[in-house]
Amino acid sequence: MFHPVSIVIMLATGCSSIVARSGTRLWEISSPKEAQYLFGPPIETSRNESTVVESYTTRRKLADDLSATAYVTDFGMSFGFHEPLNLSREMLSSTIERIRGQRVTFTFNEAGDVIACGLPEEGKKWNPQSRGDD
């Protein structure tokens, strides 16, 4: 017979990783039109000689492949015992981000291609040519 705690852990297997990986993938946005379609008009735009930086605010759930990978690793190393804690933490942080909103920035080159994107308040930055976990 299974212990009730083991049943709860088995039911929650991998959910924190799925929650972290779900949402809008910033590194897949490739043009200013796509960014404006997803986030609306920019709240701030700055230009220099070769790039344009646009800032947006959003309440969307943003995907985080690095956290998802960390949750999978933690699941394997702790044999799933940390999963209820990780799921609670991820759900709480997702809820807070959606209530509070987040600032998202995109840097475009002269051709209008995204060369960088990120969350300045959290210090996260992605190169769109990568998968998002660099």
Image (cartoon, grey):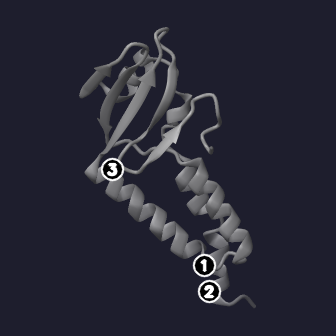
Residue flagged by tag 3: what amino acid is it? Arg
Alpha carbon separation for disc pair 1 and 3: 27 Å
Q: Which mark is residue 5?
A: 2
Is residue 133 at least partly visible in the picture?
yes
Q: Which quadrant of the view contains residue 94?
A: bottom left
Q: Position of residue 31 (x, y in %)?
A: 47, 17
Above/below status of 96 relative to 30: below
Q: Where, quadrant-wise, is the C terminus in this rendering? A: top right
Q: Residues within 10 Å of mark 3 (few under 14, many from 20)?
A: some
Identify the image quadrant of residue 57.
Answer: top left
Q: Regarding mark 2 in the picture, which secondary structure is present there?
A: helix
Most foreground residue, 103 or 3: 103
Residue assigned mark 3: 98
Q: Which residue type carries mark 1?
A: Val
Mark 1 or mark 3: whose residue is earlier in sequence: 1
Does label 2 or label 3 sit earlier along the sequence? 2
How far apart marks 2 and 3 lie (CA) works out to 31 Å
**Residue 39 rendering spot, x and y as whole percentages:** 34, 29
Q: Tell me, yes or no, whether the two marked residues, 2 and 1, touch with CB atoms within 8 Å.
A: yes
Q: Which residue is mark 1?
A: 8
Q: CA distance from mark 2 to mark 1?
A: 5 Å
SS category of the residue bearing label 1: helix
